[in-house]
Structures are given as structure tokens and as C-alpha cells.
């Protein structure tokens, strides 16, 4: 098992240190760990946020565990040298098109949700967002019309194969959960969405055990705050998924708890190649102070064990260990507690 660890900048190295402790405690067999510089750390050491040696390492690995990037020292650099380019470059180079973001309520944290506790308690959903297509990647420009008015435009499109592969990812995810898939689109207005819906219905024939439903995106936004407990897996395009996944994550509570996976089509000896990272950034305001909550990174490690290495039992153990630490009331600053980074990591280890 080849794992590339890219800690990044800001709180990245601190939270990754705790994830490494958990990884070591799991005693993974035949595990080769490579470490590379990325983001601000890549720029400062090698002059680029995604140095060639880091990219080669990520390509050679079965999975990448990513910390966070966003060093404010790099704020005034040209766009292609900014830390955030590293994550975009990795997604592209590794062909990662499916972004999985679980949002699950941990017992005892209902009060931190933006929703009423009794509504928040039922949240246990997974958003599967397409990452490589949609309006973000179509032809775009600001042009001047003949009458002198400026017009901005962005071309939205999805090819059927792009929809098919993300639909398969959604159905497969649903098969491992409660077997309910909600496809979110805007088929009442957009042709792109009409094709999306048609293709999702075609793909559904391969998954007779999964119950498929369709929802317009505006309704989905409403339902996510009205009754999030109704959802199991949501599959949607890049733009809608960007918005809905941020919304869903805040229904759960703290940013320091939320993990993500980005998967492609490449299969390794063990599972699907992927990149795993907490959804938060590099938190420059608390970097270097030992205050950051490492749980999102530890939970990203669990997702890596599940999707890239087929080690469901280890993944579940790690997730349970984190839940138990929260139940014990050990909480980081992001949850209104006072436990530091290492203290939380050690508590997870003890619980494991
Ligand atoms: P952020 O997520 O870094 O921080 C937002 C707030 O949450 C801050 O107050 C921070 O202290 C807190 N926070 C974040 N993670 C935490 C943790 N694990 N434990 C405790 N508190 C935590 O978002 P922000 O401030 O908007 O961005 C900072 C930099 O990170 C920017 O350069 C941004 O572009 C970058 N960024 C990078 C991402 C990535 O690496 N994938 C994702 C999001 C932002
Ligand atoms: Mg977003």
C-alpha cells in the first residue's frame, strides 16, 4: 500500500501529525509512506505549489492524504503560484471526478448545528459531487456587445459519459449505505439537467436494489434544512454540489469534523485511487498554536482506508474512536472546547 502524505501549510503539518499517529497505531501491513511538499510549503522549498516531485509521488501512490493549503504569505503571487492551485492540479492530474462529502451528526454535538437539535440529530447523508465538468469548465468570457454593453457568459454542459460515471459512483455509494439515491438537477429549466436525468435513469437499471428519486436543486436546498434526515446519498453536478455540500456541512456543525474524498476511475490492487482531505483550509489564524482540531483529517484517513484500500473494519474503528472521544466531551476550540491538537489525537489513539 503506497500512501502519499501531503501536509501542506498552515495547520496542515499539525493535523497531519495526529493522523500519522492513528495510521501507525493501525499497524497497516506492507505500507509505504511518502511525504511531499505542497501549497505554501511547496512554493517556499521548491518555487511551486505543486512541485514535479510531489506530483510524481501522488501519481505513484495508491492514495493521497492531503492536509490543507492557503499560506497567506503567498497571497500576492500570480494565480498559478497560489497554494490552492495545488489541489486543482492534483485533481486534474489524477483524474479525480467524484467528490464525496459525508455529513453525519455526532451524538452530543446537535447544539452546534445551525439547525434545531431535533432536526439536526437525524443527519446522516453523503453528497457525491461531480468535479470535472459543468459550468466551471465551459467556455467563458466577458465580452462587449455591439451596443457597447458588457456581457458575461459561462457555458454549461455535461457529456453523457461524464454523467454516467458520476451516476455509477452515486449508486455504488448508496449500495453501501441505506440504498437510497437522490439525483439533484434543474431539469424543469436546463437542457443539461434533462440529459443528466435521462442518463441517471439509464444507469439506475444496473442498480435495482437502490431506490432512485429526483429533486430540483432549489427544493433540495430547502429540504436540506427542513428535514435533512430524509436523505441518504445525493448525487449532483459540480455547481449544485459545490453549494449543497457547503450547506450540508454547516447543518452538522464544526468545520473541524468534516472529511472528504475525491475519487477517479483508476483502480489499484486495493481499491479506487483517491485523494482525501478535511474540508477546512489551512486556518492561518491558529496555525502553529497547537489548537487545530485534527478530527477531520483523521476521518479523512478513515475514508482512505475504506475507498482506496478496502479496509472497512479499520475505517469503522477509526470513526468510532473519534465519535467516542466527542462523547467523552473532549472538544477542540472549533467546538467550543479547550482540547489542543495533540490532546485530541492522543484521545483518539486511546479510544482506538
Ligand atoms: P479555513 O477553513 O482555513 O478557516 C476558517 C475558520 O475555521 C478559521 O477561523 C479557522 O481557525 C477555523 N478552522 C478551520 N479548520 C479548523 C480546525 N481543524 N480546527 C479548528 N478550527 C479550524 O478557511 P479560510 O480562513 O477561509 O481560509 C484560509 C486559507 O485556506 C485560504 O488561503 C483558503 O484559500 C485556504 N483553503 C484551502 C482549502 C484546502 O486546502 N482544500 C479549503 C478551504 C480554504
Ligand atoms: Mg465550496
Image: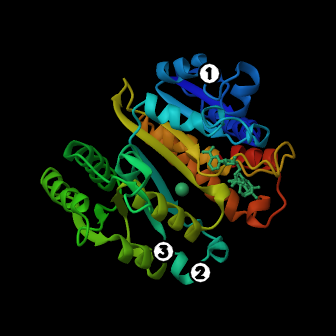
Residue toward you, 72 or 149: 149
Query: Residue 218 in the image: x percent, y percent?
Result: 38, 75
Q: Is mark 2 within 8 Å of ligand 1?
A: no
Residue toward you, 114 or 75: 75
Q: Estimate how packed mark 3 is, as few (under 14), some (14 to 19) or many (20 or more) residues with alpha carbons within 10 Å.
A: some
Q: Which residue is mark 1?
A: 51
Quadrant of the image for the C terminus? top right
Residue toward you, 96 or 92: 92
Determine whether 268 is above or below 342 in the image: above
Front disc: 1 or 2: 1
Locate residue 191: give its quadrant: bottom left
Earlier in the chain: of badge 1 and badge 3, it is: 1
Determine whether 124 is above or below 263 in the image: below
Q: Estimate how packed mark 1 is, as few (under 14), some (14 to 19) or many (20 or more) residues with alpha carbons within 10 Å.
A: some
Query: Residue 188 in the image: x percent, y percent?
Result: 23, 72
Earlier in the chain: of badge 1 and badge 2, it is: 1
Mark identifier at residue 122? 3
Determine whether the residue tagged by mark 2 lies in a helix, strand or loop.
Answer: helix
Determine whether 315 is above or below 90 in the image: below
Mark identifier at residue 343? none
Query: Residue 230 in the image: x percent, y percent?
Result: 38, 74
Residue at (52% x, 17% y) in the render: 56
Q: CA distance from mark 1 to mark 2?
A: 45 Å
Q: Which residue is mark 2?
A: 117
Determine whether the residue tagged by mark 1 lies in a helix, strand or loop.
Answer: loop
Determine whether the residue tagged by mark 3 lies in a helix, strand or loop.
Answer: loop
Amino acid at each position: 500500500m503506497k500512501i502519499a502524505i501531503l501536509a501542506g501549510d498552515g495547520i496542515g503539518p499539525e493535523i497531519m501529525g495526529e493522523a500519522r499517529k492513528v495510521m501507525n497505531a493501525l499497524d497497516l501491513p506492507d505500507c509505504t509512506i511518502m511525504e511531499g511538499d505542497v501549497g505554501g510549503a511547496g512554493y517556499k522549498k521548491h518555487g511551486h505549489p505543486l512541485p514535479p516531485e510531489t506530483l510524481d509521488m501522488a501519481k505513484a501512490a495508491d492514495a493521497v492524504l492531503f492536509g490543507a493549503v492557503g499560506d497567506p504569505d503567498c497571497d500576492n503571487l500570480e494565480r498559478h503560484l497560489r497554494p490552492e492551485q495545488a489541489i486543482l492540479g492534483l485533481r486534474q492530474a489524477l483524474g479525480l471526478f467524484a467528490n464525496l462529502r459525508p455529513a453525519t451528526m455526532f451524538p452530543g454535538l446537535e447544539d452546534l448545528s445551525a439547525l434545531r437539535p431535533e432536526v439536526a440529530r437525524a443527519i446522516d447523508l453523503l453528497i457525491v459531487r461531480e468535479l470535472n465538468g459543468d459550468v466551471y469548465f465551459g467556455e467563458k468570457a466577458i465580452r462587449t456587445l455591439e451596443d457597447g454593453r458588457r456581457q458575461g457568459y459561462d457555458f454549461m454542459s455535461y457529456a453523457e459519459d461524464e454523467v454516467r460515471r458520476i451516476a455509477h459512483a452515486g449508486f455504488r455509494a448508496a449500495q453501501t449505505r441505506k440504498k437510497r439515491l437522490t439525483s439533484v438537477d434543474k431539469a424543469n429549466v436546463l437542457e443539461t439537467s434533462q440529459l443528466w436525468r435521462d442518463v441517471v435513469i439509464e444507469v439506475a437499471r444496473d442498480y435495482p436494489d437502490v431506490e432512485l428519486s429526483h429533486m430540483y436543486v432549489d427544493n433540495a436546498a430547502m429540504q436540506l434544512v427542513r428535514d435533512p434526515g430524509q436523505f441518504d446519498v445525493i448525487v449532483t453536478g459540480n455547481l449544485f454540489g459545490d453549494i449543497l455540500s457547503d450547506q450540508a456541512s454547516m447543518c452538522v456543525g464544526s468545520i473541524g469534523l468534516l472529511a472528504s474524498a475525491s475519487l477517479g476511475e483508476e483502480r489499484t490492487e486495493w481499491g479506487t485511487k483517491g485523494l482525501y482531505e478535511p474540508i477546512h483550509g489551512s486556518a492561518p489564524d491558529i496555525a502553529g498554536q497547537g489548537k487545530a482540531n485534527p478530527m477531520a483529517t483523521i476521518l479523512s484517513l478513515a475514508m482512505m482506508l475504506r475507498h482506496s484500500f478496502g479496509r472497512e473494519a479499520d475505517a469503522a474503528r477509526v470513526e468510532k474512536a473519534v465519535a467516542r472521544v466527542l462523547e467523552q466531551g473532549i472538544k477542540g476550540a472549533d467546538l467550543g472546547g479547550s482540547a489542543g491538537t495533540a490532546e485530541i489525537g492522543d484521545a483518539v489513539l486511546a479510544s482506538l
